[in-house]
């Protein structure tokens, strides 16, 4: 015997409205925007990784808003991070060196000037070491900035 869901009035089959799809889309746009903000903060704050957050933002936007996705990929300053990763072009040597130097400067300043707890210092140094190893094991590309030879991206 086949059972059918009924609508709220108990009459006939229940209709699946667009609300769940709209809610999912709104949640993905919201998550994409949060990831985008974290990626932008990561440009100037070396403890946050820029590219992974921008990739997450692009993935959320790809599933929820073509307009936001196209804007992000076409962005003069942010699109290069995503395109370079997607195309397997690697990280420019200058960007690697600058990222690692700023990372360690920030970690050392935070660990020794602001935290007296040994465990927090160990965690901070461990995270910095992990990020350093990750960056050093990524493909190195000749050129500058997120846009490469076009020279329009952030360095």
Image (cartoon, rainbow, N blue to C red):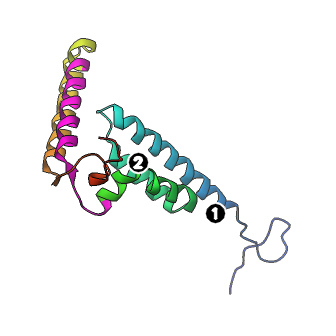
- Crowding around mark 2 (Cα neighbors within 10 Å: few <14, some 14 to 19, many 20+) is many
Q: Nearer the viewer, residue 103 or 5?
A: 103
Examine the image and state in which quarter residue 19 appears.
bottom right
Which x, y percent locates residue 145? 28, 45
Mark 1 is surrounded, within 10 Å at the Cα level, by few (under 14), some (14 to 19) or many (20 or more) other residues, namely few
Magenta-highlighted residues: 86-110
**Residue for point 31% across, 48% down:** 151
Q: Is residue 67 magenta?
A: no
Marking on residue 21:
1
Whole-angstrom CA distance, mark 2 to mark 1, is 28 Å
Q: Which residue is mark 2?
A: 78
Is 55 displayed left or right of 24 in the figure?
Answer: left
Is residue 124 something one can see in this rendering?
A: yes
Pinpoint residue 21: horizontal percent, then vertical percent.
63, 63
Question: Is 91 covered by the magenta stretch?
Answer: yes
For the C terminus, which image quadrant? top left
**Vertical position of residue 136 compared to residue 42: above or below:** below
Quarter holding the N terminus is bottom right
Tell me if residue 44 comes above or below residue 117 in the rendering: below
**Location of residue 50 by image quarter:** top left
Q: Can the viewer see residue 65 in this picture?
A: no
- Give percent across and percent down for residue 9: 86, 67
Against 113, is 15 above or below?
below
């Amino acid at each position: 015997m086949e059972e059918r869901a009924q609508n709220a009035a108990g009459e006939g089959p229940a209709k699946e409205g667009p609300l769940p799809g709209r809610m999912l889309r709104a949640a993905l746009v919201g998550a994409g925007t949060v990831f985008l903000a974290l990626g932008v903060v990561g440009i100037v704050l070396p403890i946050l990784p820029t590219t992974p957050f921008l990739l997450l933002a692009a993935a959320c936007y790809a599933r929820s808003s073509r307009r936001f996705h196209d804007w992000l990929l076409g962005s003069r300053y942010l699109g290069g991070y995503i395109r370079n990763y997607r195309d397997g072009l690697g990280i420019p040597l200058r960007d690697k060196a600058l990222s690692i130097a700023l990372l360690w400067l920030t970690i050392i300043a935070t660990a020794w000037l602001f935290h007296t707890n040994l465990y927090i210092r160990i965690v901070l140094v461990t995270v910095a070491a992990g990020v350093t190893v990750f960056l050093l094991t990524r493909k190195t590309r000749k050129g500058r900035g997120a846009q490469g030879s076009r020279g329009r991206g952030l360095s």
